[in-house]
Amino acid sequence: MASEDHILFELDDNVGIVTLNRPERLNAVSWELASDLVTLFRDLRHRDDVKVIVMTGAGRGFCSGGDAEWLSGGGDRVLPGLSDPDAIMPRYQRKTPAGPCAEFTRTIIELEKPVIAALHGPVMGAGLAYALACDRRFADPTTRMCAAMVRLGFAPDCGITYFLPRITSVSNALMMVTTGRIVESQESFDIGLLDELVEEGQALPAALAYAKTLAGGPSVAIDLARRFIHKALTSTLDEMLDYEAVAATLSSNTHDAREGTQAFVGKRKPVFKGH
């Protein structure tokens, strides 16, 4: 089912599969594509039938980054500094120049459901930021990762500078954002940018298998756990102990908590319902 021509959405056993669908442009991010991704993810946050999301790309790659036509200032959407200086810029864009392109990174985290990336081909620029914002990254040997902004003369954006030093290292992050060097799949795996490196063409099946395992679990507890891992990145130990106490209380009031404890005592496999 298509939510928009440039985004495909499919539901498979409580796993929502979101496919970037601009294969002729290597799924380059336009203002419109990013806007529709934000809208879709905000809707998915409130859908109880969607417990986990898998993000992938149609065609030869996941995402090549920002759309070059727009970034050159030649598109219909105004770009500060590059478009006609007399062009009218919407008020929202004046306050937030990257607009939905950056907002989508935040939306991935705020979805409060696991988001798994199935990667192949180019994973560059904004596409790299979106992949890094996901909970886990499955990739095949065609995957090539690059903080490509500097290649076009831009500083990094869309959250790349937040995620890179946390996922790999400060020195690797500095290398990537200052050189724009393309990092091939094996090196990406070796430095921690990829979590699973599978055979060519198998990234999506592997990501789906993992996602379905999560979708069959106690999703309220899983979503709370995900929320607090992100919160821990900017919190103290004392704060996290308090947050965890709240989460334990919230999750204890679910069907799945009762089912999980009863199944453990009864020495049987629990049947979670996600509520």
Image (spheres, rainbow, N blue to C red):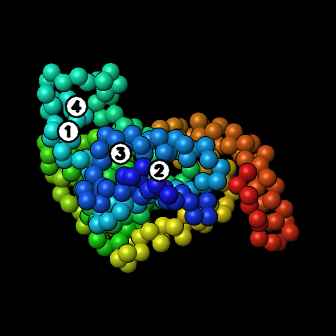
Foreground label between 2 and 3: 2
User: Which residue is found at the position 42% from the left and 58% from the top?
Assistant: 19
Q: Position of residue 48 (x, y in %)?
A: 65, 49
User: Disc 2 on helix, strand or loop?
Assistant: strand
Lower sequence index among marks 4 and 3? 3
User: Which residue is found at the position 31% from the left and 40% from the top?
Assistant: 31
Residue contact at pointers 2 and 3, CB within 8 angstroms: no
Residue receiving disc 2? 3
Residue receiving disc 3? 33
Residue receiving disc 4? 78
Lower sequence index among marks 1 and 3? 3
| Lateral position of residue 247 relative to residue 72, left or right | right
Lower sequence index among marks 4 and 2? 2
Q: Is residue 275 above or below residue 184?
A: above
Q: Is residue 141 above or below residue 49?
A: below
Residue receiving disc 1? 75
